[in-house]
Amino acid sequence: AVCLTLGVAVLSGTTAAQEIVGPGGVVPYGGPARGPRRYGYVRDPAAGFFVAGSTLSGLNGVFARVVPLDGEKLAYRNALSGWRLALGAATWSFADALERERFSHPGGTVLPGAGLKWSRVEVGRGTPRDASHSEAAAAIVTTSSDDDDQAAWLAELPWQVVYVGDERRVRQLERMAAEREAAIRRALRIGAPSTDA
């Protein structure tokens, strides 16, 4: 539901001036409203990303640009969950709040991919991020012949990774997500049965 709410918010206010771009990196620019469309390529790093579609709630949400750690070219953090998205020497990766690398895919561009571009890094074998972080964990991919396991890890993938080029828009999306989380917490407190005897 968080993904749907923010996804609708992202898409409902989208204009080329706000620079929200999906995987592939092509954004319309200029030209008359009803005339032919022209396209350009995204070359500048995003101010943030909106990630959705994963069954892992911490992976979904708004990732704002942060100062990269040693070995990272670009880094983004989800303030609500603590997850990180980073571009290393040649690999994009998602790390969970415990700093374990969970997903990776070959990089080399300022736009990470979505869906099947990502491989799952085996939990417990990913390396915590620190000053000596390497891309070695990206090569450790879970392989399973069990269809249920395969379906479960496919459902965990980030199926939508949307470029947000405007820092104000990133902050607006972060505020919306925080307000939604606060509303959920209030509703759960109100609806919870009293423990008073």
Image: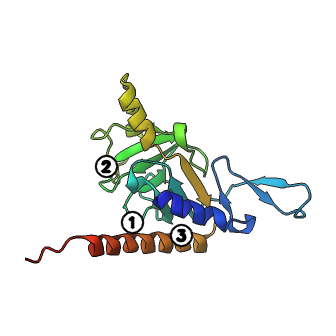
Q: Are marks 2 and 1 in contact (CB under 8 Å)?
A: no
- Which SS class for mark 2? loop
The mark that comes first in sequence, 3 or 1, is 1
According to the picture, the residue beneath numbered tag 3 turns out to be 173
The mark that comes first in sequence, 2 or 1, is 1
Which quarter of the picture shows residue 45?
A: bottom right
Q: How is the image coloured?
A: rainbow
Residue 7 placed where, x, y %? Answer: 56, 60
- Residue 2 in view in this figure: yes
Q: How far separated are the C-alphas under marks 3 and 2?
A: 28 Å
The amino acid pointed to by label 3 is: Leu
Q: What mark, if any, has residue 128 been given in the picture?
A: 2
Residue 66 placed where, x, y %? Answer: 47, 65
The amino acid pointed to by label 1 is: Leu
The mark that comes first in sequence, 3 or 2, is 2
The amino acid pointed to by label 2 is: Pro
Q: In this rendering, is residue 177 above or below 57? A: below
Q: Residue furthest top?
A: 145
**125 lies left or right of 33:** left
**46 lies left or right of 100:** right
Residue 16 placed where, x, y %? Answer: 74, 64
Q: Mark 2 or 1, which is nearer the eye? A: 1
According to the picture, the residue beneath numbered tag 1 turns out to be 80
Q: In this rendering, is residue 175 above or below 165? A: below
**125 lies left or right of 54:** left
Q: Are marks 3 and 2 in contact (CB under 8 Å)?
A: no
Front-most of 2 and 170? 2
- Residue 70 in view in this figure: no
Front-most of 153 and 125? 153
